[in-house]
Image: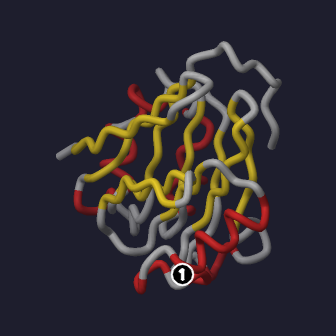
Amino acid sequence: MDDIENKNKQYKIVVVSDSHGDTSRLERLLPIINSADYFVFCGDGAADVMRLRGRITVPIVCVKGNNDFWLKEQLNDSATVTFGGAKALVTHGHKYGARQGITTLLEMAKLNDYKIVFFGHTHKYTDVIHSGIHFINSGALCNGSYAIVTYDGQTFVSQNCFIK
């Protein structure tokens, strides 16, 4: 999924991962999701997104996680999207050793010229820049954590948010 190369646009991206069946939290998040430009879901609860997709009014980037085995034919392990010229990787992270750190994700990002990587799996909010590449993990929605990320054509800024 590629966006029009609009480097002057301000993007608002709602990033969620690891809902693990907590559809009610995801449902309460719908007004925030629908006020964004994109909704990015980084796996483990993709069926929750599929249940609510008819009520999501913005483009969805959704990948499967290690617990989304029943969706293995419908979803990919990773996706690429471009925000105003900045190439982004969306993945759950389990196939890249995210629990052990971002080393493999960093290698993948460098090889493919990604400017930002959205991932999940660890259930821990992460917002770090390494070697000029931004890594954001929204934390686990099943614990109430999600992220709002803005991009102004130059810089990604992430805010860790919570919903009961």
Q: Who is closer to the viewer here, 145 or 7?
A: 7
Q: Position of residue 138 (x, y in %)?
A: 38, 54
Q: Which residue is outermost to the front?
A: 131
Residue name at image x 70 percent, y 38 percent: 86
Q: In which quarter of the image is residue 21?
A: bottom left
Q: Which amino acid does label 1 sit on?
A: His
> Looking at the picture, does residue 14 appear above or below residue 137?
above
Q: Where is residue 6 in the image (x, y as percent from the top left)?
A: 75, 19
Residue 57 at least partly seen: no
Residue name at image x 42 percent, y 33 percent: 30
Label 1, residues with CA under 10 Å away: few <14, some 14-19, many ≥20: some
Residue 132 at least partly seen: yes
Taking the image as shown, residue 141 lies to the left or right of residue 76, namely: left
> Looking at the picture, does residue 17 appear above or below residue 2?
below
How many labels sit on residues? 1
> Looking at the picture, does residue 34 appear above or below residue 128?
above
Q: Where is residue 23 in the image (x, y as percent from the top left)?
A: 39, 54
Q: Position of residue 42 (x, y in %)?
A: 54, 60
Residue name at image x 49 percent, y 60 percent: 130
Taking the image as shown, residue 106 lies to the left or right of residue 4, namely: left
Tell me, what colour scheme is on the image?
Answer: secondary structure
Q: Who is closer to the viewer here, 73 or 12?
A: 12
Taking the image as shown, residue 74 lies to the left or right of residue 27, namely: right
Residue name at image x 56 percent, y 62 percent: 46
Quick one: quadrant of the N terminus?
Answer: top right
Taking the image as shown, residue 98 lies to the left or right of residue 23, namely: right
Mark 1 lies on a secondary structure that is helix
Question: Pointer 1: what residue?
Answer: 94
Q: Which residue is outermost to the top?
A: 8
